[in-house]
Image (cartoon, helix red, strand yellow):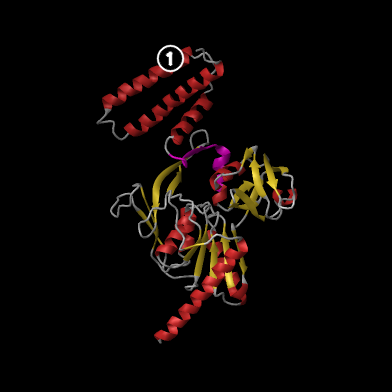
Amino acid sequence: MTLKPLSLLNLLLSMISGILLGIVIFQWYYSGHISRHISGYSSTHANIAAALKQIDQHFVGELDEKTLTNQAINGMLAGLDEYSELLDQQSYANLVSHSQGEFVGIGVEIKLSNGFFTVVRVNRGTPAESAGIAVGDTIRAINGTSAKGMSAEQISQQMQGAIGTNLALLLKREEQAELIPMVLQRQLITTTHITHKRLANDIGYVRITNFDQNAGANLLASLATLNKQRATKGLILDLRSNPGGILRACVDVAEIFLDGGLVVSTQRSSTFLADDPSKVDYFASTGDFSAELPLAILINEGTASASEIVAGAMQDHGRATIIGNTSFGKGTVQSLMPPLPDGQALKITTAYYYTPNGRSFHNAGIEPDITFSANEDELLEFAAAHLLQEQSSSAVDISVGE
């Protein structure tokens, strides 16, 4: 059978990618084992060099060095796990700015609902507000690709792009039969990722949509505002559809509700080992800044990574009631490597997360204490009622004890 030119090109590109991948892997692996494997390293290196020479001399098409290099690195990372990736210069810059409370986007907050992401907030003075995007709109397609079944991380990647570039959305609005196409221009958005409000019966509500470096300070500010007029009787911390963020930030949030104690551990082993030499423990500082306020945490299938750390820590310490549905199950640490010579950067999985009790939630998620599926109003009403009941029970216990 004669291969078509396109098929042959793809085949050869795959071969070259694999070869370049091999170079990187072998150089990395054998750098620490060269004294014990010098002969094996030499023979492998010779084979790779010979193969590259043959491709360079005999391949009929044009070879673009940068494209081939990126394909090789992407192929290598894809073979590791689903979270390790090569970030181009813009994606790297976006990730850094996003962790600082800024990001390039259109200015919406979304949550997963019935297989699609729904707009739950439109930030003021943003492209989304100017275009007329409304709370309740669901994203049916993004950049020409169906959004059904996308994870929070996948849709976040689709939203990313350089300032001034276009983002194409196809939206469904409840009262309209036809889908609404929109093309918006990305801008630098500044946000706290935190909103708060007071519910009936003096129950406070705080929603965190991402753990940027200011998450702890912003949460304390929200609690202070909620208590300014009169003290709240309980707090609902909403972590639904929160994809995570900075490890240090989620520790900052957790310690607001803990009087010391372990928040999370990381280690390279996929099975918890108490004496693992790679284990790193992250502890809360002493002093419960929430004054032991009754706490309920809302989670769902979009709650991931740093959000799961907070939920898992509160659950293990018995500090909060976890309500909702099993979380996403992203229990691995991704470390951002120093930029490569061309300005791109590698994000590599370097460890596993473990809750204070040594539980791994990777691919398993955090199981709620109370499984509850309902619409927004019913969920908040249920959580608030649970907190009031908890407070009432505590008061009875205290009086009996006295």
As drawn, is 140 to the left or to the right of 15?
A: right
Q: Give the residue at the far left of this rendering.
A: 36
At horizontal 43% and vertical 59% (from top left) the residue drawn is: 312
At horizontal 31% and vertical 26% (from top left) the residue drawn is: 41
At horizontal 62% and vertical 76% (from top left) the residue drawn is: 229
Q: Quadrant of residue 145?
A: top right
Local crowd size for mark 1, using a 10 Å CA cut-off: few (<14), some (14–19), many (≥20): few
Numbered label tally:
1
As drawn, is 249 to the left or to the right of 203?
A: left
Eyeballing the image, is 382 above or below 402? above
Query: Which one is nearer the viewer's eye here, 83 or 345?
Result: 83
Query: Which one is nearer the viewer's eye here, 161 or 138?
Result: 138
Eyeballing the image, is 175 above or below 63? below
Q: Amino acid at mark 1?
A: Gln
At horizontal 46% and vertical 35% (from top left) the residue drawn is: 78
Residues drawn in magenta? 81-96
Q: Residue 165 in the image: state x and y as whole percent.
A: 67, 39
Q: Residue 184 in the image: state x and y as whole percent.
A: 70, 43
Q: The C terminus lies in which quarter of the figure?
A: bottom left
Q: Is residue 140 magenta?
A: no
Q: Quadrant of residue 22?
A: top left
Q: Residue 358 in the image: state x and y as whole percent.
A: 35, 57
Read off the residue under disc 1.
Answer: 54
Q: Find numbered disc 1 in the image and state the secondary structure of the residue it sits on.
A: helix
Q: Is residue 85 magenta?
A: yes
Q: Residue 15 in the image: state x and y as whole percent.
A: 45, 22
Eyeballing the image, is 48 above or below 225? above
